[in-house]
Amino acid sequence: MLPWEQVRRRGVDRRAAQEDNVLSSLHEAAGSTAARTAPMTARSSDGQSDALLARILSSLDDDKAENVVTIDLRGRSSVADYMVVCSGRSSRQVGAIAEKLVERLKEEMGRNCKIEGKEQGDWVLIDTQDVIVHVFRPEVRDFYQLEKMWLPAAAAAAGKPV
């Protein structure tokens, strides 16, 4: 392995480890032990997560996010009801999309969201509790292929969002 490949690999491994720990550390900081130990069922039976998802998708559309994929996690994960994966064209746009989304959710829905990775602008994770939003630069999204891991096998093979 060439030296530059070793450096790149270390950076990738470090980023992957961060992603593995981000959700658990965010929920621990928020004191949501019950959410992690609860059975994997939909947590918001009153449609709160559906309304939140609709507002998030609207915000992403307003800010010209590309290739938006929504993944239904209800019954598959106790961390959130939905995951949204999208791309921005540049690091600057990725940061702006994330920042505007957090501002809109705080103003309009009173949601205090946790945000990780905005400084780098390659991959920003926004935890709204019911919906996890990932905003990527296209190259980073292609590298990690996060939606392939979460989409049902038939949808992933067809390349279709859930």
Image (tube, rainbow, N blue to C red):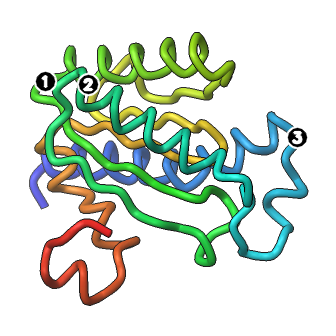
Picture coordinates of residue 91 (x, y %)? 20, 21
Residue under the image location 39 percent in, 14 percent down: 100
* Residue where numbered disc 3 is placed: 31
Q: CA distance from mark 1 to mark 3?
A: 34 Å
Q: CA distance from mark 2 to mark 1?
A: 6 Å
Residue under the image location 73 percent in, 53 percent down: 46
Quadrant (top left/top right/bottom left/bottom right) for the C terminus: bottom left
Direction from residue 37 to residue 25 in the image, left or right: left
Q: Earlier in the sequence, mark 3 or mark 2?
A: 3
Dot 1 amino acid type: Ser
Which numbered dot is residue 2?
A: none
Q: Secondary structure at mark 2?
A: helix
- Using the image, determine if residue 103 lies above or below residue 64: above
How many callouts does the rendering have?
3
Q: Secondary structure at mark 3?
A: loop
* Residue where numbered disc 2 is placed: 94
Picture coordinates of residue 53 (x, y %)? 48, 44
Name the residue nearer the viewer: 116 or 96. 96
Residue 58 occupies quadrant: top left
Q: Are marks 3 and 2 in contact (CB under 8 Å)?
A: no
Q: Residue furthest bottom?
A: 154
Q: CA distance from mark 3 to mark 2?
A: 28 Å
Residue under the image location 62 percent in, 56 percent down: 80
Q: Residue furthest front?
A: 46
Which numbered dot is residue 90?
A: 1
Crowding at dot 3, Cα within 10 Å, few <14 / some 14-19 / many 20+, comes out as few
Quadrant (top left/top right/bottom left/bottom right) for the N terminus: bottom left
Crowding at dot 2, Cα within 10 Å, few <14 / some 14-19 / many 20+, comes out as many
Q: Are marks 2 and 1 in contact (CB under 8 Å)?
A: yes
Q: Secondary structure at mark 1?
A: loop
Name the residue nearer the viewer: 21 or 141. 141
